[in-house]
Image (cartoon, rainbow, N blue to C red):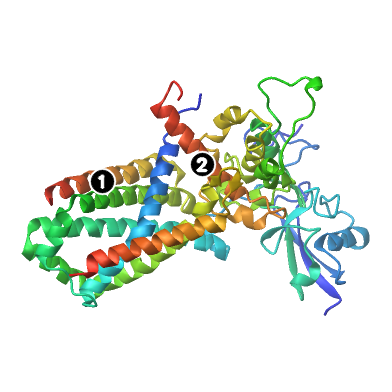
Amino acid sequence: MADRIRLQVARYRPEQESEATCDEFDVPCPKDWVILDGLNHIKDQLDGTLAYRWSCRMGICGSCGMTVNGEPKLTCATFLHEYAPGPIRVEPLRNFPVIRDLIVDIGDFMRKLVTVKPWIVRDEERPLSAGEFRQTPDEMEEYKQYSMCINCMLCYSACPIYGLDPKFLGPAAIALAQRYNLDNRDQGSGQRMDVLSEHEGIWGCTFVGECTKVCPKHVDPAGSIQRYKLTAALDSMKSFFLPRGA
Amino acid sequence: MIKRHPEPLLWVLFSAGGMLSGMLMPALILMLGIAYPLGWVTPPTYEQMAGLMANPIVRLALLGLIALSLFHWAHRFRHTLYDGLQIKHLNEVVAVVSYGTAVVGSALAAYLLWQVG
Amino acid sequence: MRADTQSSKAFVYTDYHPRWLRQPKHTYWWLEKPSYFVFILRELTCLPVAWFAVYLLLLIQAVIDGPAAYEQFMAWSASPWMILVNVVSFALLVFHAITFFVAAPQALIVHLGRTRVPGSLVLMGHYAAWAAATVVVIWLLGRA
């Protein structure tokens, strides 16, 4: 096993250039080093101007998503030795505008997320004296998978539809909407339906399935979208045939 | 109020068409398109085929299969042209041509299946 | 204040908000990864679906037109090109069926009472129905 590996890191310095360039660095390759360790080594020892995001380095904050050899990955969860002998191409997350080097802007997602109301919506707030909500394990299982999303944006990077049509709501936003729709404490599915049923909501999805493949937390956003398509379609037909309610 | 657009209905037709065509077409094409012409199975005589097609259940099943399969094709084809070749500017034209063909094909199927009885 | 008129609509780029790099997706994105290509292939199985619907319509028309037209149709479908088309279509239709049934459990969430039927069982149900439908079709058409 080689003890060094080459990283080909995409650079973008807007004050100097208008296109992306590539810098190559040789970094140590111990067995337990991940790509993020390689990037930190570059920043500490080789080129302090490299700009990238990271935080928890343990796969829960969702900050360190980048494109590694063409695939969206969490760089804190991807080992260098998996790609030996290298070289490894590290690029910013695809489908997002690049601010600098490996940093992308995910403002589009943040704005879309708010539109699906990712919080418990109640018709009437319960008073504190009524006590806590009780939920059986089965009831929690219904939505638990979709609550695991860490907003890392790997799914948006993998989704070709989002790449082609930036108006598409996207996998994570829909999965998070489902997390609340399926939570039995929530009474807001009707309010979310308007946004989700738009042309660029769930109906933009053609079930490529890449989002589920790349999700590091096994949220299965593709499944959540298909499930909601059935729900929305049944609801749409119901309101068509019974416009004044069943 | 949900803004009305036909996507949900078209998706239901696509799903139903996909399910029916998946279930029935492999066996049908194996028999009608491969086994009969190659003589693996003796093809039915004209009288036997006409008799089979005169059956109202068979005709209804064929109508459902043909119509829903055409809508399945129309929906998928339209989306694939849009995503695969990115011809956004022709979006309305492609939609009208695809679903229009499906409607015409279904009407034709209904007419022919009425006649064959 | 530097206004960047070349790039996208709303933003005025300043020293504190420099130009972002937007890399558009190229038309042949589906050649980039094998899974993208398989996806497009799966979507293109709609073509043999439409083709066989047309084939059925032609068969029905031949039956309406009488015994001579029927024999002509059978002879036409025995020609080498038609056999090739139908064999390729058969393979693509099987691929369509399998990919569709694998996708179905993701949309069809079935609850029996309060327990959820696992996706694998829903998938098995689809395969069982497929087997049953195939047997019925072959029996109906094979007993000439």
The label number, if any, that marks residue A148 in the structure image:
none
Q: Which residue lies furthest to the right in this view?
A: A45
**Which residue, as the protein is rendered here, is positioned at the far bottom?**
A1
Do residues under tags 2 and 1 come within 8 Å of each other at their CB atoms?
A: no
Q: Quadrant of residue B48?
A: bottom left
Q: Is residue A69 left or right of residue C45?
A: right
Q: Where is residue A40 in the image (x, y as percent from the top left)?
A: 88, 59
Q: Mark 2 points at which residue?
A: A229
Is residue A147 left or right of C143 when viewed as pictured? right
Q: Residue C93 at what x, y percent from top left?
A: 38, 63
Above or below for A209 versus A33: above
The number of numbered badges drawn on the structure is 2
Q: Nearer the viewer, residue C32 or C67?
A: C67
C-alpha distance separating marks 2 and 1: 25 Å
Residue C3 visible in image:
yes
Residue at 63% across, 51% down: A220
For mark 1, what is the residue? B106
- For residue A3, above or below residue A24: below
Q: Position of residue C105 (x, y in %)?
A: 52, 53
Which residue is depicted at the point 90% across and 56% down?
Answer: A48
Q: In this view, does A34 lie to the left or right of C94?
A: right
Q: What residue type is labelled 2?
A: Lys
Q: What is the crowding at mark 2: few (fewer than 14 residues within 10 Å), some, or many (at least 20)?
A: many
| Amino acid type, residue under disc 1 in the picture | Ser
Foreground residue among A191 and A241: A241
- The residue at 54%/60% (across/down) is C36
Secondary structure category for the residue under label 2: helix
The image quadrant of residue A117 is: top right
Q: What element carries label 1?
A: helix
